[in-house]
Image (tube, rainbow, N blue to C red):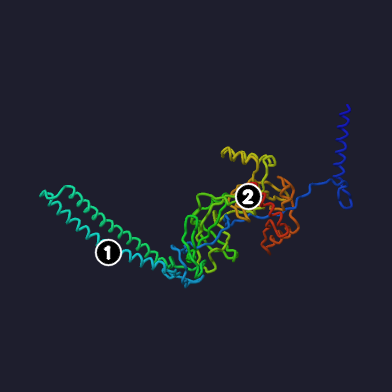
Amino acid sequence: MRGLLTLLVLVAVSGGLFALASTRRGVDAKPILNVATEVALTVRTAAPAREAIIRLVQSPGDVEAVLEVDVSSEIVAKIEEMPVEEGDIVKKGDLLCRLNDDRLRAEVDSANAYIGQLRASIDLAEADLDKARRDYDRQRSLSEANATSQLELANYHTTFKKARSAYAMRGHELEQAAASLKTIEEDLKRTIITAPISGIVSKLVAKQGEVVITGTMNNPGTVIMTISDLSKMQVRTRVDEVDVPLVKVGQKARVYLQSDPNTPVPARVVRVASKGSRPTGRDVVTFETLLEVLSTADRIKPGMTANVEVEVAQNSNAITVPIEAIVNRMRKDLPEAIVKEIDERRSKVDLSHRALQAQYHRVVYVMNGEKALVRLVDIGISDTRRVEILGGVGVDDMVITGPYRSLDQLEDGKRVALSDKDKEKANTSEDGTEETEQVAGGASDDSDANERQGKVASGG
């Protein structure tokens, strides 16, 4: 009985409050009792645009010549003459450096004298061989007539063999001396260093009067200068392992030099490393990528640092929205109709993908009158500013792009309203006096835009 009385009292109180809220004063027609209503979230909106969108992969790099040669010496000698300076243009075969050749010329004279000595000794050995042959032949004739002993015949035969070997040895010594002379003469030619390619002296290391040395296993040797062919340039860049699967040979690219960051230089991908490398002390794995520079401008010089943008994907007729409009929502925070749509899509993919998608899903909120409606979207390529929409939003929709505080509180069916500034822009656009698009971000809320972009990226 007591419970019934309590229920009747609650019904009576509720009815009285409803009556008071419905009863209006006669003077201003306002209700006698004001009941709090839902406060609308202030939002910014933007209309999807049909435009071209390009996905870029960015990385730092260094400019270098495609053909670049370090000029070194093949002998140890002092630089006697160097007629070129850094920055000089040289042609293949031009004199770059002349080394001191006094020692080598003396060795040539000594080798020639030794060869003359060997030739004289060969003549002597040949005469000894002839005498030994005659003596041996005579002893054989005497032996046949039983006019000499077998021991004497054997001794003459041994003398003959020794003379023949001495003659052959002198001949081999002459060949060896001739080969040594040839080596010395080759070293003498190496005292004249000429340009191996046509180009410019991009770096001059050694100076006249210095002694240059040859390279060994533990010593790289003296680099006299560097010759670079500036007619063909390339950029050696390091692409992050996350982006390298998108980079292919032949893709277009743009190079922005640190000396002129506002003027892009056209380029093309010519090689992508098949194995990554990890810089010392860092956990980031990068893949070395070469880009051919498609320009011969004088401002492009070896050794410059640059930033590279590679066009890895593009769509010339895409429906795009500002990147701030894409938000991530957990399954439990989405309405039943969206969850049903997610489940229908999940049945068509493998288990690993389903496990990933079960946590967060990409959605967009569109403004419908005074309410925000959630839409499940499929996205394509993106750049730093906009995202391609493959499905879920049309060009006639008005997507909510911010501010971030409002996006974080948005739910399906939530009451929303434009700011006074956006209302004025919308009214001006309807009058036809100004074509206006409510783009998210703005100078007054750059921090919100940056925070939103980071959250979208972390959500996949």
Q: Mark 1 or mark 2: which is in front?
A: 1
Q: Which residue is mark 1?
A: 120
Q: CA distance from mark 1 to mark 2?
A: 102 Å
Local packing at callout 1 (Cα closer than 10 Å; few below 14, some 14-19, many 20+) is: few
Q: Residue furthest top?
A: 1
Q: Quadrant of the N terminus?
A: top right
Q: Residue furthest left?
A: 145
Q: Which residue is mark 2?
A: 393
Q: Amino acid at mark 2?
A: Val
Asked if residue 140 lies left or right of residue 364, the reply is left
The residue positioned 27% from the left and 62% from the top of the image is 121
| Residue 213 seen from this side | yes
Question: Which type of secondary structure does the marked residue at label 2 adopt?
Answer: loop
Number of numbered discs: 2
The residue positioned 50% from the left and 70% from the top of the image is 209
Nearer to the camera, 196 or 295: 196
User: For residue 164, what is the image quadrant?
Assistant: bottom left
Question: How far from the left and from the top, in percent, is residue 79?
Answer: 47, 69
Local packing at callout 2 (Cα closer than 10 Å; few below 14, some 14-19, many 20+) is: many
Q: Residue furthest bottom?
A: 83
Question: How far from the left and from the top, in percent, is residue 152?
Answer: 18, 50
